[in-house]
Amino acid sequence: MISGIYTGLLLVVFLGIVAWAWSKKNKAKFDEMSQMALKDDDEITDKTEEKTHE
């Protein structure tokens, strides 16, 4: 009995995570992250690190 409840709870949690991942409000963020590996390292570094002028 308890294992069935535990399995059902895990199924609901899994489906919640899937729904969150596929929601429209996360699409832009995930699209940007999917392109990070293709961008030049310098371009990513410029966006994430503070520039210092010597």
Image (tube, rainbow, N blue to C red):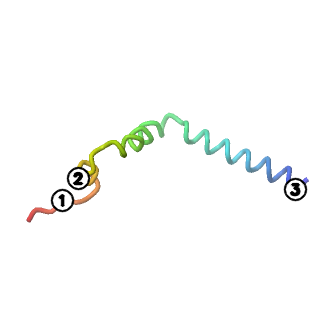
Which residue was labeled with disc 3? Answer: 2
Q: Quadrant of residue 3?
A: bottom right
Q: Element type at marker 1?
A: loop
Q: Would you place residue 43 above or below residue 27 in this image?
A: below
**Few, some or many C-alpha atoms within 10 Å of disc 3 (few <14, some 14-19, many ≥20)?**
few
Q: Quadrant of the C terminus?
A: bottom left
**Few, some or many C-alpha atoms within 10 Å of disc 2 (few <14, some 14-19, many ≥20)?**
few
Name the foreground residue: 18 vs 37. 37
Marks 1 and 2, the one that precedes in the sequence: 2
Task: Give the Cα distance between marks 3 and 1.
Answer: 56 Å
Q: Quadrant of residue 34?
A: top left
What residue do we see at 61% from left, 41% from top?
A: 18
33 relative position to 49: left or right? right
In percent of width and height, residue 21 lies at 55, 41
Q: Are marks 1 and 2 in contact (CB under 8 Å)?
A: yes
Residue 6's mark?
A: none
What residue do we see at 73% from left, 50% from top?
A: 10
Marks 3 and 1, the one that precedes in the sequence: 3
2 relative position to 23: left or right? right
Q: Element type at marker 2?
A: helix
Residue 51's mark?
A: 1
What residue do we see at 34% from left, 42% from top?
A: 38
26 relative position to 39: left or right? right
Task: Give the Cα distance between marks 2 and 3.
Answer: 53 Å
Name the foreground residue: 34 vs 38. 38
Which residue was labeled with disc 2? Answer: 46
Q: Residue furthest right?
A: 1
Amino acid type at image mark 2: Asp
